[in-house]
Amino acid sequence: MCIGTATFSLINIVKWKIDNNKNSTIIDELQNNSNINSNINFDTLVKYNSDTVGWIIVNNTNINYPFVQTKNNSYYLNHSFNKEENSAGWIFLDYRNDIDNLSKNNILYGHSRKDKTMFGSLFNVLEESWYKNENNQIIKVITKNEVTLWQIFSIYIIKNEDYYLTTNFDTRNEFIMYINTSLYRSIYNFNTIVTPDDIILTLSTCNGKYKKLVVQAKLIKKEVSYSE
């Protein structure tokens, strides 16, 4: 029994490393072929993966990837950008959202990989030196049609729940309550005013088995994208 358990654990470790290496190779290729400071060729990205809908950058983390979207929130939990099975998964947009017609809350998911890929380096946001640096408080999202900037207003760890994953709200008051809950939960007061007229971006990743790390930001700027 012990030998069998040890063998199973070793197999899992080897698979974990292989999957990480495969994803790291894809990441290097994507980043080397994209000029994030100017144009991203979405036509090329879509040829690589037809599910591509955007690119996200979080300063002073490793998060500098295209993100995808499909018809459910399970496929990219165990498939990489090349659509091959991979336990590292990929960054993906909630299937209920529409990148061209933003919901009140737009959610990106990713695994918290120990090698700091996917949303593994998102845990940098818990460091005081990170969240007090104003340069880090702006998230950039690039799509084929526009570049958007998002101001972080809340960072928190929460037990597994569905509430923070609400994408749209039936009433204005419901959204106000949601905003107030998010602000109350934050580990730091960013002094950012969030109103019911705002649009929110939520980044979500696992913190162990029973908790989630959540970063939330509001849309502050939209520009026409000149992606090739």
Image: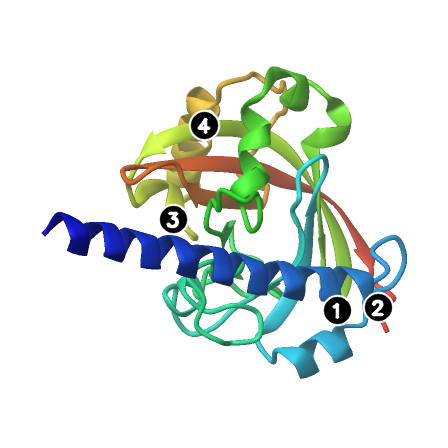
Residues under labels 1 and 2: Cα distance? 6 Å
Residue at point 59% right, 30% down? 124
Residues packed near mark 4 inside 10 Å, few (<14), some (14 to 19) or many (20 plus): some
Query: In the image shown, does 7 or 181 lie closer to the viewer?
Result: 7
Q: Which residue is mark 1?
A: 144
Amino acid on which disc 3 is placed: Thr
Of mark 1 and mark 4, the one earlier in the sequence is 1
Amino acid on which disc 4 is placed: Tyr
Residues under labels 1 and 4: Cα distance? 31 Å
Residue 227, disc: 2
Q: Does residue 157 appear left or right of residue 223 in this picture? A: left
Amino acid on which disc 2 is placed: Ser
As displayed, is residue 9 above or below residue 125?
Answer: below
Residue 217, disc: none
Asked if marks 1 and 2 touch (Cβ < 8 Å), the reply is yes
Residues packed near mark 2 inside 10 Å, few (<14), some (14 to 19) or many (20 plus): some
In the rendered image, residue 36, in percent from the top left (x then y), is placed at: 83, 55
Asked if marks 2 and 4 touch (Cβ < 8 Å), the reply is no
Amino acid on which disc 1 is placed: Lys
Q: Does residue 214 appear left or right of residue 161 in this picture? A: right
At mark 3, the secondary structure is loop
At mark 1, the secondary structure is loop
Residues packed near mark 3 inside 10 Å, few (<14), some (14 to 19) or many (20 plus): some
Residue 77: in sight, yes or no?
yes
Residue at point 48% right, 22% down? 186
Q: Which residue is mark 3?
A: 166
Q: Which residue is mark 4?
A: 156
Of mark 2 and mark 3, the one earlier in the sequence is 3
Of mark 2 and mark 4, the one earlier in the sequence is 4
Of mark 1 and mark 2, the one earlier in the sequence is 1
In the rendered image, residue 168, in percent from the top left (x then y), is placed at: 42, 52
Residues under labels 3 and 4: Cα distance? 16 Å
